[in-house]
């Protein structure tokens, strides 16, 4: 989170510098001069550092495409006004009275195809004006000329036609004039500004595509990246129209593409807002807006261009109503916006303020400070930058949430793996420990059956049945302790007595093998333990001596100040020095066994606070010592 704040602190100043620079580039400092006669008299103005914007009415002859000589010969047919509102094609004349010298002229071509004559010479052809739609080829450009005044006069004659756009939207008189250097500076400023704006949108698009591919679950980055691509295209088709100069598109294709960006950008931006402000835009609104944008897109693709230009204001009204709806919903539903949402709201407020300011500017109502130029385009860019910061912050939040979810999943998987391993160990433990009691039960059951068949119902028969009962009970205890937590039901247990009982159980098997067991255990070896579990441990030690030893088995037991201990010694092959340090690990066995008996026993004894010590020498045998804490208090009471 701290790193995110630092990044935001860095981004805001950078964005502020870029936007201030762009805004400063829009300051062209034109001096507006309006004429209602078609003649502009600039002979008394100072062209040192100033540029002049010539606007107003012109001389024109409707429904005629004339050369300067032809226009001069038909002066009795001229009108004063706006030719773009009077006819589909016409010829206009502008006369500018200036001091002798060289001047720079800049302006957009008239209407949607034009041919320009300056001081009697054909200077520029933008498209091809015609007296019918079929003979006209539409095109528009930002033009720059260097002109030398002849006898203090600059005369501009323009042939123009418009069959592709609604009437009244292609002025014949909107010209910037000044020294060549100053006007060229304005011209280059227009080109550079448009290029910077396009570059900003393209960079934002790449940045948010990268963010989306890093975190595809956060769809806001995808919608915003596509929006930036759309507005990159639109920025290239407005103003100086840079993209048509770079891409080999016909005027019709470029015009449709420019208009198509409006519904596409509107829909993508609303989808972005819906991702940044979940739940704010209702489903019915999103469906209705999608339908309206789809309808507008179809019109942009297939309708006549004049119909398009006449219909688009209605879609702008839809956009206005959608903006009002979004503002109302935000006001009603958004109570505690997060950082990303706050940034978006601040950027939107700046843009709305600037848009309102420009509306008053075009209405010649200058009630806002610094109201000497339009700023909506810069404000839109500021808003987009704010949106970018909000998206960046939102992406970081999503990344953090994804990492936290991944950590939680990893923790859960680790716990599941641990539980699975515990279950696996439990099954191995149970299967291992049950084998020996079952073997004892089988052996004594066979003996009991034999005695039953021979009708030998003596004390040995009863003892064999008791042993079967005890071993069956031990199996039940093993299952219980294996399937429940170890170390429960602790109490005073005489491990010496347990050792004597287990040694007696092994005696018949040892006798059959021709081996002996010698037991020398002191009385009252009371320890704090679970009787069933410690019985299992001592049985494992005796059973290992039986399996891995040869000859006799010696069992001794006693106590010291802290522990009671049992020592089981066999005289078999012993344990290899390579295996001895790891003999308590699961799966480690010197004889090819399961390697579970000692591991299970070691776990049980450690839980009781005791220890198992193994001493072995290959070829001589093994001595295993079981140490368990004494049950002191009860022992002292018993002595009293």
Image: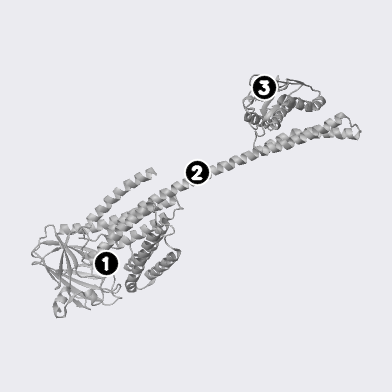
Q: Residue furthest bottom?
A: 76
Q: Report the residue that reaches farthest toward the right.
A: 455
Residue 76 is left or right of residue 136, and the answer is left
Q: Is residue 236 above or below residue 446?
A: below
Nearer the observer: mark 2 or 3; the answer is: 3
Residue 5's mark?
none
Query: What's the colour scheme?
Result: one colour
Residue lying farthest to the front in this orientation: 640
Q: For mark 1, does the 10 Å Cα neighbourhood hold few (<14), some (14 to 19), or many (20 or more) residues?
A: many
Categorize mark 2 by other alpha carbons within 10 Å: few (<14), some (14-19), many (20+): few
Q: Quadrant location of residue 38? A: bottom left
Give the alpha-carbon distance from disc 3 to disc 1, as whole Å: 112 Å
Q: Which residue in the structure is indicated by mark 3?
A: 636
Mark 2 or mark 3, earlier in chain: 2
Marks 1/2: CA–CA distance = 59 Å
Task: Inspect this view and state whether residue 588 appears.
Answer: no
SS at badge 3: helix
The tag earlier along the polypeptide, 1 or 2, is 1
> How far from the left and from the top, in percent, is residue 556?
72, 20
Q: Helix, strand or loop at disc 2?
A: helix
Identified at 46% across, 48% down, the residue is: 401
- In percent of width and height, residue 305 lies at 33, 72
Q: Give the secondary structure at mark 1.
A: loop
Q: Which residue is mark 1?
A: 140
Callouts 3 and 1 close, C-beta under 8 Å: no
Name the residue beneath numbered marker 2. 407
Q: Earlier in the sequence, mark 3 or mark 1?
A: 1
Residue drawn at x 41%, y 50% as measured from the top left: 395
The front one of 150 and 5 is 5
Residue at the image point whose x is 58% and y is 43% from the top: 416
Pinpoint residue 208: horizontal percent, then vertical percent. Answer: 39, 53
Which quarter of the figure has residue 320? bottom left
């Amino acid at each position: 989170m701290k790193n995110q704040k630092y990044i935001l602190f860095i981004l805001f100043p950078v964005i502020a510098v870029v936007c201030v620079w762009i805004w400063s580039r829009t300051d062209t400092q034109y001096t507006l001069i309006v004429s209602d006669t078609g003649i502009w008299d600039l002979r008394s103005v100072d062209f040192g550092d100033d540029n002049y914007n010539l606007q107003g009415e012109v001389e024109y002859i409707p429904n005629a495409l004339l050369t300067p000589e032809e226009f001069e010969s038909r002066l009795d047919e001229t009108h004063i006004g706006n030719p773009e509102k009077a006819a589909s094609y016409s010829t206009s004349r502008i006369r500018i009275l200036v001091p002798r010298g060289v001047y720079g002229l800049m302006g957009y071509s008239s209407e949607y195809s034009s041919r320009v004559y300056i001081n009697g010479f054909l200077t520029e052809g933008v498209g091809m004006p015609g007296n019918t739609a079929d003979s006209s080829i539409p095109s528009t450009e930002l033009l720059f000329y260097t002109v030398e005044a002849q006898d203090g006069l600059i005369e501009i004659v323009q042939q123009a036609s418009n069959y592709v756009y609604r009437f009244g939207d292609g002025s014949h008189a909107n010209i910037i004039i000044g020294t060549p250097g100053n006007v060229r500076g304005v011209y280059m400023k227009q080109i550079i500004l448009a290029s910077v704006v396009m570059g900003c949108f393209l960079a934002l698009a790449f940045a948010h595509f990268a963010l989306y591919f890093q975190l595809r679950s956060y769809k806001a980055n995808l919608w915003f990246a596509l929006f930036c691509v759309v507005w990159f295209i639109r920025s290239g088709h407005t103003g100086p129209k840079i993209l048509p100069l770079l891409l080999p598109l016909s005027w019709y294709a470029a015009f449709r593409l420019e208009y198509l960006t409006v519904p596409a950008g509107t829909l993508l931006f609303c989808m972005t807002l819906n991702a940044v402000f979940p739940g704010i835009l209702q489903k019915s609104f999103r469906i209705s807006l999608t339908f309206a944008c789809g309808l507008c897109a179809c019109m942009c693709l297939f309708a006549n261009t004049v119909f398009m230009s006449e219909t688009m204001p209605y879609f702008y009204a839809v956009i206005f109503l959608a903006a009002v709806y979004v503002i109302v919903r935000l006001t009603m539903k958004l109570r505690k916006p997060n950082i990303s949402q706050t940034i978006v709201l601040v950027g939107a407020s700046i843009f709305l303020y600037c848009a309102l300011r420009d509306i008053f500017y075009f209405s010649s109502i200058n009630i806002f400070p610094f109201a000497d130029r339009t700023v909506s385009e810069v404000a839109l860019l500021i808003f987009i930058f704010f949106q970018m910061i909000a998206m960046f912050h939102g992406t970081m939040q999503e990344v953090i949430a994804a990492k936290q979810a991944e950590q939680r999943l990893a923790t859960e998987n680790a716990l599941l793996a641990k539980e699975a391993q515990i279950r696996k160990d439990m099954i191995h433990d149970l299967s291992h420990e049950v084998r020996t009691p079952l073997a004892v039960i089988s052996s004594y059951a066979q003996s009991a059956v034999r005695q039953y068949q021979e009708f030998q119902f003596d004390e040995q028969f009863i003892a064999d049945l008791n042993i079967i009962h005890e071993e069956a009970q031990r199996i039940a205890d093993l299952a219980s302790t294996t399937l429940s937590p170890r170390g429960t039901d602790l109490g005073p247990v005489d491990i010496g007595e347990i050792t004597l009982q287990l040694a007696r159980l092994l005696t018949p098997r040892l006798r059959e093998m021709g081996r002996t067991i010698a037991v020398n255990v002191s009385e009252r070896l009371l320890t704090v333990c679970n009787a069933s579990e410690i019985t299992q441990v001592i049985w494992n030690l005796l059973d290992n001596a039986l399996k891995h030893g040869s000859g006799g088995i010696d069992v001794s037991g006693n106590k010291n100040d802290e522990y009671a201990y049992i020592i089981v010694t066999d005289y078999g092959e012993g344990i290899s020095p390579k295996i001895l340090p790891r003999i308590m690990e699961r799966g480690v066995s010197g004889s090819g066994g399961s390697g579970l008996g000692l591991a299970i026993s070691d776990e049980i004894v450690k839980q009781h606070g005791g220890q198992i010590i193994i001493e072995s020498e290959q070829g001589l045998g093994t001595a295993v010592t079981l140490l368990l804490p004494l049950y002191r208090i009860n022992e002292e009471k018993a002595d009293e």
